[in-house]
Image (cartoon, helix red, strand yellow):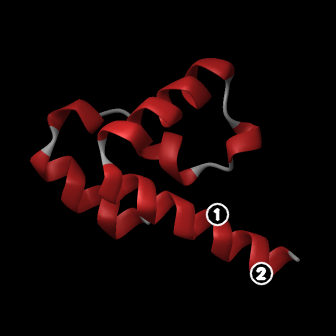
Amino acid sequence: MNQVRIIERKEHHELKGHKYTFLKKRENLSATKEQALDELIKLYPTQGEAYRLKVLFNDLSTG
């Protein structure tokens, strides 16, 4: 997830300041950050797919 985020960040300056928006668990995000996450996933599909895979992997490893 972080490698994809770094690559995408170099190409899209709008992602600046959202490092932990993608790296934190969704339940630990504020309502504002959770809304931003939803919007960023729609705007940046590569980032969204990496996030989806991160969530799936975390679900498998915890459960």
SS assignment at label 1: helix
Q: Residue 1, relative to residue 40: is it above or below?
A: below
| Residue 49 drawn at (x, y percent) | 43, 61
| Residue depicted at x 31% and y 65% | 4
Relative to 32, is 2 on the left or the right?
left
Rounded to the nearest angstrom, the CA distance separating label 1 from label 2 is 10 Å
Q: In this view, does 47 lie above or below 17?
A: below
Q: Which residue is drawn at 35% across and 32% down?
A: 17
Residue drawn 31% across the image and 37% down it: 43
Quarter-wise, where is residue 18 in the image? top left
Is 49 on the left-hand or right-hand side of 9? right
SS label for mark 2: helix
Give the residue at x 40% y 64%: 2
User: Tag 2: residue type?
Assistant: Ser
Count of picture labels? 2
Instruction: Please state which of residues 24 and 53 is positioned toward the viewer in this rendering.
Output: 53
Q: Identify residue type, mark 1.
A: Val
Task: Give the residue pinned by disc 1.
Answer: 55
Measuring from the top left, give residue 50's x and y in whole percent.
Answer: 44, 64
Q: Quadrant of the C terminus?
A: bottom right
- Quadrant for residue 59, please give it: bottom right
Furthest toward the bottom, the residue is 61
Q: Is residue 51 left or right of residue 5?
A: right
**Classed neighbour count for the residue bearing mark 1: other residues with Cα under 10 Å, few (<14), some (14–19), many (≥20):** some
**Residue 38, image x and y in percent?**
51, 34
The image's mark for residue 61 is 2
34 lies above or below 2: above
Q: Is residue 24 left or right of residue 45?
A: right
Q: Nearer the viewer, residue 38 or 30?
A: 38
